[in-house]
Image (cartoon, grey):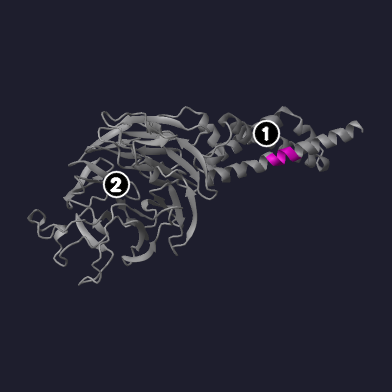
Amino acid sequence: MTDNSKNTNLKRCIDIASAVFILYIPYCAIWAHYNPGPLRPLPPQLILLIVDILPSVFGLVWLLYRYLEVLNSRFPFLRTFARSPLYKTIALLIIGLLTILVKAYMPQVTFAAELTKEQSTPHEIQRLHVKGYINAVAWNTDGSRLAALSNFGGTITLWETKNWAVLKEFDRYGGGYSFNSLAFLPDGSLLTAAPIGDYSKDPRYANTPLTDPKYDTLQMFSLIQWNPEAGKPVRYIPDLGYPPKDLSTKVTDTFAASGDGALIATVWADDVKLYETRNASVSQALSVPPAPTHSDYAMSVAFSPNGKELAVGTGFGKVHLFNPLDGSLIHSITAYPTEWYACSALAFSPGGKFIAIGKYSGSDGKLINGVWTKRDANDVAISIWDVSETHILISLVGSTQKREGKDDALVIRTLSWSPNGEILAAGDDLSLRLWRVSAPRPTLLLEKKMSHGTFSTAFSPQGMLAATDNNEVVIYQ
């Protein structure tokens, strides 16, 4: 084989490698865009080398050189220019400009570079005091309002987030306190659970929303939709008409709204009911599939970001994914194979690719080989799953905090993803924990003991985190 043939074959191989590198750039951008969460299989330094440095320097320089070489065959005067220092300078400037454009308009391509930078730990910037113990917090769709449900469900407080001024504080009722469910709809209205008890004859609630003159009791409803800035109810869900056509109890303390606000899923008895907000009517009644040897029951619900999937966590460690439009079961995830654990909290990643599942042990111990073994704190944990492929990606250990004088199990009460999918916030009976889950190895950024645990967390669209701590909302940034 002649030297010219060897050089030609070498150039062809390098051409192929260059094309592969160049095509790999948009592939990585698309992959990172649709997989914003915890699946980063390679070390960040290696990803940085493959995604950014090699394609930018090697690939672009070689392709530009080969292009000029082709031009040289028709325009000989370019041969001298291609070998000059000026050409090398211009080529480097072009590469630099292209790199800047890639970083400006395709930030997913350089996510590895961002991972190699020192990440700042979220820090507390504000504490908001409310009346009584806080059950739940929620941001509106643009992050300009923050609401808190407190005082055993008796009080709703609304803040303007640009200066943290209280816009409205009004009494709701006592009883049926929505657990840690509270949600803004896109139109700015606020959802809470309806009351459990019959307070219509109780003088403490005279002339309040609880004593609507049209109804003797509100416990036949599931939800109340509020105008939070006026402190007035907009309507009751479901719409039963007047006089009411259905007096069966529809009590719920756990619910979730779809991103577009069109559907609301409520845990009702052991199953799930879906309501359409358009007409406040029941659209689907979903039954939880039974466990192999006994019945199962719903414990938590969450909509995917696009609203095409509804996840239902059960008391015996299953997560069932339903199509909320027709009620069909898509598939199921066995989050915890033993029946000691329940799925106490659910949260889809912003891209909908992953789901975080909170773990709850219903007992302070279990029998292992005939010996009663105390539950370790790390038994209470979070697992992150690939929704479509139904396999586990990450398992996060439980809180390291200890509950003084008590051996009962901790519960993962709340899970929330940051808008960019980089951070997962988890609250339990003792603490708040923030995990960076985007790196190959999850990093615990913050673990803070709370006086009464963290029942509710929520990220604003701008990335601020609101977390409950007894009678205060703590804001992190």
- Amino acid type of disc 2? Asn
Tell me where residue 281 appears, x and y as whole percent.
32, 67
Quarter holding the N terminus is top right
Report if residue 432 lies within the magenta region: no
Residue 67 locus on image (x, y percent) = 75, 41
Instruction: Check the picture and name the quadrant holding the C terminus.
Output: top left
Q: Residues within 10 Å of mark 1 (few under 14, many from 20)?
A: some
Q: Is residue 368 above or below residue 178?
A: above
Select label 2 or label 1 by which is in front: 2
User: Mark 2 or mark 1, which has the lower sequence index?
Assistant: 1
Q: Nearer the viewer, residue 243 or 170?
A: 243
Task: Identify the residue at horizontal 31%, vertical 52% (top origin).
Answer: 254
Residue corresponding to mark 2: 180
Q: Give the magenta-colored segment's residue range.
A: 16-20
Q: Nearer the viewer, residue 99 or 7?
A: 7
Q: Type of residue at label 1?
A: Ala
Distance from label 2 to label 1 (Cα)? 58 Å
256 displayed left or right of 8? left
Where, by quadrant of the figure, is residue 443 drawn? top left
- Residue sitting at x 82%, y 43%: 74
Mark yes or no: residue 319 visible.
yes
Q: Closest to the observer: 99 or 197?
A: 197
Res. 144 in view:
no
The answer to the question of whether label 2 and label 1 lie on touching residues, with beta carbons closer than 8 A, is: no
Q: Residue at x 21, y 56 (%)?
A: 196
In the depicted structure, whether residue 74 falls above or below residue 203: above
**28 to the left or right of 338:** right
85 left or right, relative to 349: right
Q: Tell me the element at label 2.
A: loop
Q: Position of residue 100 (x, y in %)?
A: 56, 36
Tell me the number on the disc at residue 91.
1
Q: Residue furthest front?
A: 370
